[in-house]
Image: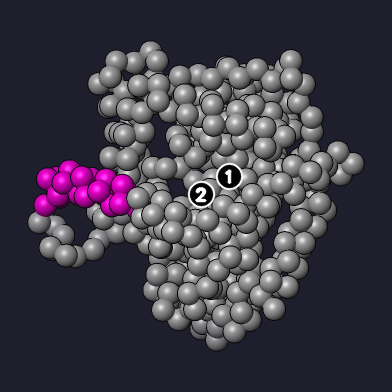
């Protein structure tokens, strides 16, 4: 029965993407089918094989050690504020982002990241059937961040037609930056974080290939990549990435304070007026989506509430809510829901992406803002698709 529901869910997602397509006659089925099959295979390997277990343990161990190194810096500055063995979200989850940001800067400065992004992107373009630029951008979004990725293609961003710009923005919203992966792993199981990162990459291409299909002239598909650290000294770069990491931590902290407080206020008001919390109400709205993702109907309302929270606020708020009630879900539901949460698909991301593009090109920024809701629609379908793929193998 689980397989039947997952197949129905997969068809529903593809139909929803098809309904929003701007060029249905141009959709190419072969690369879409290949990427869906590849998603299932990768999810199975990562979650159900010894190799996958070893790989995920290795990745988790790397981030575990990185967080310990980051803790040395945090404790030096804020030592004594957190009791030994205690947990404060800002200190334990957000401030380590600064150290991860520094490592990304070093890898960027030493040309290691640009090399990986370019050649892995070229390989993925062979699978996805999309242009070299689109494939490079998806890898770059994953490694350098949602807004920083546009800096790496700033030489050509003003020359891009709206359809190619949409795909670049969609990749930035569907994936997550490596700078926050360690923070995610403190809130949900690392195996689901790693799996979501891998299959979201192809999910973004699948949904974009349906919603926004087009051909790229090979003669026009020139990959002009801007090295965002090439004109800086090493220590200038370190300072910039340290401050960038700090900005991310502070921005996320501010958003969490605002959103968590607002949700608490709205929940209280709804309880007084209607006798039901706002999140519980949203749970009923999103429960059918949770069900087609493979979550049992008995758990779909609670799961739907967390899904809605992620869309309206952000993934950190939703992950925090999930952590509080994780023991009320079955392991399978917990896995499906965790994968759904690993993305930047929320309303705030529309402003972040449009602002990043606008900072580089005023006109392109306005175009990105105009298709903001369609971006969010597509990125949310990517999250649902990834959860459905995982439901096949759990």
Location of the C terminus by quadrant is: bottom right
The residue most toward the right is 25
Q: Residue at x 32, y 40 (%)?
A: 100
Q: Circle 2 sits on which residue?
A: 197
Q: Circle 1 sits on which residue?
A: 201
80 in relation to 365, above or below: below
Rendered location of residue 375, percent (x, y): 66, 45
Tags 1 and 2 touching, CB below 8 Å? yes
Q: Residue at x 31, y 34 (%)?
A: 103
| Res 121 → quadrant | top right
Disc 1 to disc 2, C-alpha distance: 7 Å
| Res 361 → quadrant | top right
Is residue 373 in sight in this rendering?
no
Rendered location of residue 346, percent (x, y): 56, 53
Q: Is residue 113 left or right of residue 83?
A: right
Residue 313's label in the rendered image is none
Q: Which residues are magenta?
A: 60-79
By secondary structure, the bulk of the magenta-drawn segment is best described as helix
Label 2 neighbour load within 10 Å: few <14, some 14-19, many 20+? many
Does the magenta segment cover residue 16?
no
């Amino acid at each position: 029965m689980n397989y039947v529901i997952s197949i129905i869910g997969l068809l529903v997602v593809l139909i929803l993407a098809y309904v929003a397509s701007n060029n249905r006659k141009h959709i190419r089925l072969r690369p879409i089918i290949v990427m869906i099959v590849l998603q299932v295979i990768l999810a199975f390997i990562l979650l159900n094989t010894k190799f996958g277990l070893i790989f995920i343990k290795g990745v988790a161990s790397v981030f575990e050690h990185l967080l310990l190194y980051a803790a040395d810096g945090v404790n030096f500055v804020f030592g004594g504020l957190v009791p030994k063995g205690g947990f404060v979200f800002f200190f334990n989850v957000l401030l380590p982002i600064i150290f991860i940001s520094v490592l990304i800067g070093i890898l960027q400065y030493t040309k290691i990241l640009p090399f990986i992004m370019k050649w892995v992107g070229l390989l993925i373009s062979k699978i996805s059937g999309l242009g070299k630029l689109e494939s490079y951008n998806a890898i770059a979004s994953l490694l350098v961040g949602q807004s920083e990725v546009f800096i790496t293609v700033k030489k050509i961003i003003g020359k891009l037609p709206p359809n190619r710009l949409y795909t670049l923005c969609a990749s930035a919203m569907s994936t997550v930056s490596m700078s926050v992966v360690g923070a995610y792993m403190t809130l949900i199981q690392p195996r689901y974080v790693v799996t979501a990162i891998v299959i979201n990459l192809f999910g973004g291409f699948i949904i974009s290939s349906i919603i926004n299909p087009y051909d790229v002239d090979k003669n026009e598909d020139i990959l002009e990549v801007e090295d965002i650290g090439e004109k800086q000294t090493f220590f200038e770069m370190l300072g910039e990435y340290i401050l960038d990491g700090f900005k991310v931590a502070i921005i996320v902290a501010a958003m969490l304070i605002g959103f968590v407080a607002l949700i608490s206020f709205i929940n209280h008001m709804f309880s007084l007026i209607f006798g039901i919390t706002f999140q519980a109400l949203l749970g009923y709205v999103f429960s059918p989506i949770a069900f087609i993702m493979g979550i049992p109907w008995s758990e779909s309302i609670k799961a739907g509430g967390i899904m809605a929270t992620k869309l309206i606020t952000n993934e950190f708020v939703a992950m925090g809510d999930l952590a509080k009630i994780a023991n009320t879900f079955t392991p399978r539901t917990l896995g499906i829901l965790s994968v759904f949460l690993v993305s930047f698909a929320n309303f705030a991301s529309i402003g972040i992406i449009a602002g990043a593009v606008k900072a580089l090109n005023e006109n392109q920024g306005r175009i990105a803002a105009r298709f903001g809701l369609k971006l969010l629609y597509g990125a949310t379908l990517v999250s649902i698709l990834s959860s459905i793929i995982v439901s096949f193998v759990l």
